[in-house]
Amino acid sequence: MLARIAATRYTHALARTSRFARTLSTTATLRMDSAGEKTQRKPSVATQGTVLKGLNIYKDGKDPVALKDEEYPEWLWTLLDTPAEESVGERERQRVQRSKAIKEANFMKSKKK
Amino acid sequence: MSKKGGAVAGTASILKLIVPAGKAMPSPPVGPALGQRGIKSMDFCKQFNDRTKDLTPETPTPVSILIQPNRTFTFTVKSPPTSWLLKRAAGVKKGAAQPGKEKVGTVSLKHVFAIAQIKQRDPALNHVELKSICRSVVATAKSVGIQVVH
């Protein structure tokens, strides 16, 4: 699982540079809802105003209070989703693309005249 | 470590400890570890307690002490362990004996978000995206047997 996370982070980083944006696929970022739907989102168990007990570490502080669901960033609700199934051969394709990109980058960095 | 006036220079060493905030003193965790490296534990404890005076007393606080060959030291105080924060949020004293197979507590995504905000104050995590920190917290929850719900 760690290797996959490392792989997706690497592909993200490369995808940001425009040079490689065309060549890398984005299936690595596809995520499915646990219910299989991408539009509906259930309300959180911790409703607005719930005191998040035990999370205050300062002497003169109070436990944080839960905000409305809408006030949290969108990506928070995707943290529990299971990743979409990869198509057959996707891993191999990404491996080949990645090693090609590394070789190109190394060549560009090298000081061969 | 290094002898005074010796030809070979000693190297700095790093000592990592987890000390209850505001309560550094007892022999077991702090005393021998520092004493072995030639540091007066009283000096460290005074400075540590001073730096952690804003924290709730007895919060386990990881601290990284850099000890120079001439026996001076500097230290960085870090955020409390994620597993400890999760157990507090879930209202649980001990983690699961068999994480993955048993669940000892539940925590919501909003708790995870609040915990990540605390962790982001750690010097090592200052420049890490909050989303990445949240993902680490979710993974830590899995390792202590705390279930994260929506």
Image (spheres, coloured by chain):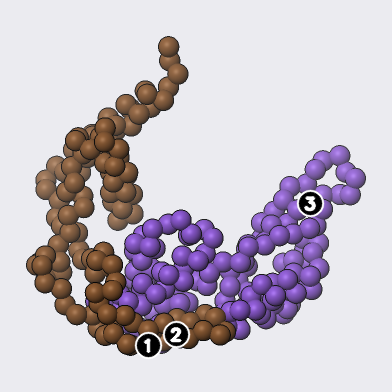
Chain colours: A brown, B purple
Q: Quadrant of residue A11?
A: top left
Camera-nearest residue between B24 and B101: B24
In percent of the image, x 78 and y 51: which residue is there? B69
Say what secondary structure mark 1 lies in.
loop
Q: Nearer the viewer, mark 3 or mark 2?
A: 2
Alpha carbon of mark 3 to alpha carbon of mark 2: how far? 43 Å
Task: Say which residue label 3 marks.
Answer: B69
Name the residue type under label 3. Answer: Pro
Say what secondary structure mark 3 lies in.
loop
Q: Chain of mark 2?
A: A
Say what secondary structure mark 2 lies in.
loop
How far across and how far down the image is residue A8, in percent? 28, 49
Of the image marks 2 and 1, the number of the one nearer the N terminus: 1
Q: Which mark is residue A63?
A: 2
Q: Which mark is residue B111?
A: none
Alpha carbon of mark 2 to alpha carbon of mark 1: how far? 6 Å
Q: Nearer the viewer, mark 1 or mark 3?
A: 1
Q: Which mark is residue A51?
A: 1
